[in-house]
Amino acid sequence: MKLSDLSPAQGSTHVAKRKGRGIGTGNGKTGGRGHKGQKARSGGGVRVGFEGGQMPLARRIPKRGFNNIFAKPLDSINVSMLDRFEDGAVVDEKALMDAGIISTCKYGFKVLGNGEVTKKLTVKASAFSETAKQKIEAAGGKAEVI
């Protein structure tokens, strides 16, 4: 095979329509823009979402809730994931990353109560759900907020 033999897959490319190149092309004269009007002019057209002065849909629909742009979202893990650590271990951000449970932890993590934990662990996290705290302490461990 040579470089000159390479070609794109059949049907994957299209020849561009050449506008304004004569009546025989089907796209001559006005070049598919019709007659007059804002969209027929060079540089003409309206911005995305513009509805000719009518109140745009994005502004007609009621807004609900609040989205805090300064929020620092926590990663979450369940107590069932903590059972892979050995008894008496200290589980923190670094330990979870080394174990491959979380990949990045920008703002910290929260421990949620799904599953069971059977080992006595000291868990250091940004936050705990109430059930997660109870399950860790019931197994003889400690839940420390950092």
Image (spheres, grey):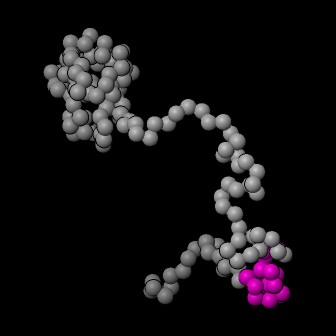
Q: Residue at x 36, y 20 (%)?
A: 129
Image quarter (top left, top right, bottom left or bottom right) of the C terminus: top left
Asked if residue 125 is positioned above or below residue 38 in the image, the reply reads above
Q: Is residue 76 left or right of residue 48?
A: left
Image quarter for residue 43? bottom right
Image quarter for residue 65? top right
Q: Is residue 3 left or right of residue 102?
A: right
The image shows residue 114 at horizontal and vertical percentages of: 39, 21
Res 97 seen here: yes
Q: Residue at x 25, y 13 (%)?
A: 137
Magenta stretch? 19-34
Image quarter for residue 91? top left
Q: Residue at x 27, y 16 (%)?
A: 136
Tell me which secondary structure the magenta stretch mostly adopts.
loop
The image shows residue 69 at horizontal and vertical percentages of: 44, 41
Res 10 seen here: no
Asked if residue 48 is positioned above or below residue 99 in the image, the reply reads below
The image shows residue 117 at horizontal and vertical percentages of: 29, 19
